[in-house]
Image (cartoon, rainbow, N blue to C red):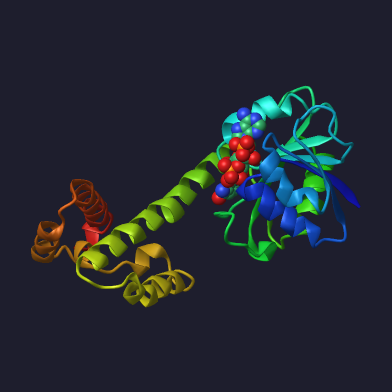
């Protein structure tokens, strides 16, 4: 049985806590956070603390706090294996004096939407094989997918994640705005979005691309650009269209 303390009470802390609660091999012995109101969510299931000094003894301390707070909170932890959950923070941000690691779940988490951890990749890093195995065993209690990822690889992975998740989601928002300006519901685009995702399970994104920029259809691009009022959306349209044209320049 792995004894676990979770530091932090936000999106990731809640989702991890709920997932570990379903495992017979992990006991979350404490959740610590500076926000008493947020700790109330965990109060009925485990011990909670509103400070990070003298936390309960545990095998692993998971830091699910904002990236900027990782080093500060970690300095309070004097024993056990301390792992942060951040995509873009090096393992070196944790104090050198202790056992340190990374437990990065590659998914987008919000408090309102519960996720199923089974298929969420958990990217792990540790400084020796013993600690790596501790984190791997912990991850396998909630997910079937663990990956050994170095701090340098994780920086790149997080960057890739920003492109495929945050930027794509922003483009969904732009699409919704344009639909609504024309009196249409965003719902009408959902089958197209679903097919876009289904396709990349069967071919590469490079092969899957269609549309005016790939065909170098300058006439359609001009008509579309003229419809966009928002300057920043115009710039996005031009930049992405140019990037698509450069990507397929050889075949045009
Ligand atoms: N959200 C995602 O999709 C996602 C995915 C993978 C990994 N991550 C990583 O997971 C970690 C947590 O992210 P999150 O989305 O759960 O963030 P979040 O919902 O904003 O929660 C942040 C937590 O950190 C605490 N905190 C902030 N500053 C602090 C400080 N100076 N001292 C002590 N505690 C502090 C907050 O406490 P207060 O409530 O008091 O501010 C809160 O409990 C981050 O490293 C993030 O990069 C996030």
Query: How many discs appear?
Result: 0
Asked whether, in this view, residue 184 is left or right of residue 201, the answer is left
- The correct choice, above or below, for 115 with respect to 5 in the image is below
The foreground one among 23 and 138 is 23
Identity of the residue drawn at 23% across and 46% down: 232
- The correct choice, above or below, for 103 with respect to 113 in the image is above
In which quadrant of this rendering is ligand 1 seen?
Answer: top right
Residue 205: % across, % down: 39, 64
- The correct choice, above or below, for 66 with respect to 72 in the image is below
Asked whether, in this view, residue 242 is left or right of residue 196, the answer is left
The foreground one among 180 and 209 is 180
Residue 36: % across, % down: 70, 39
The foreground one among 134 and 250 is 134
Residue 150 shows up from this direction: no
The foreground one among 220 and 173 is 173
Identity of the residue drawn at 29% across and 58% down: 174
Q: Quadrant of residue 173?
A: bottom left
Residue 128 shows up from this direction: yes
Residue 71: % across, % down: 66, 27
Q: Quadrant of residue 91?
A: top right
Identity of the residue drawn at 38% across and 73% down: 190
Asked whether, in this view, residue 167 is left or right of residue 71, the answer is left
The quarter of the image holding the C terminus is bottom left
Residue 139: % across, % down: 75, 53
């Amino acid at each position: 049985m792995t004894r676990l303390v979770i530091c932090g009470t936000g999106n990731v802390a809640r989702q991890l806590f709920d997932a570990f609660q379903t495992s017979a091999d992990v006991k979350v012995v404490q959740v610590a956070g500076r926000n008493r109101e947020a700790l109330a969510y965990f109060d009925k299931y485990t011990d909670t603390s509103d400070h990070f000094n003298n936390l309960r003894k545990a095998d692993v301390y998971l830091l699910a706090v904002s990236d900027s707070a990782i080093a500060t909170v970690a300095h309070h932890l004097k024993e056990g294996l301390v792992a942060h959950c951040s995509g873009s923070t090096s393992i070196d941000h944790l104090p050198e004096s202790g056992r340190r690691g990374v437990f990065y779940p590659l998914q987008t988490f919000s408090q309102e939407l519960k996720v199923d951890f089974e298929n969420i990749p958990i990217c792990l890093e540790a400084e020796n094989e013993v600690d790596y195995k501790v984190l791997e065993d912990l991850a396998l209690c909630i997910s079937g997918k663990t990956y050994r990822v170095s701090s340098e690889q994780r920086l790149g992975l997080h960057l890739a994640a920003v492109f495929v998740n945050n930027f794509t989601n922003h483009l969904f928002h732009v699409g919704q705005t344009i639909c609504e300006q024309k009196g249409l519901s965003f719902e009408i685009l959902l089958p197209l979005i679903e097919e876009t995702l289904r396709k990349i399970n069967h071919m590469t994104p490079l092969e899957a691309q269609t549309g005016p920029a790939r065909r170098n259809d300058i006439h359609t691009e001009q008509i579309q650009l003229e419809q966009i009022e928002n300057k920043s959306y115009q710039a996005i349209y031009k930049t992405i269209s140019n990037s698509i044209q450069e990507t397929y320049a050889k075949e045009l």
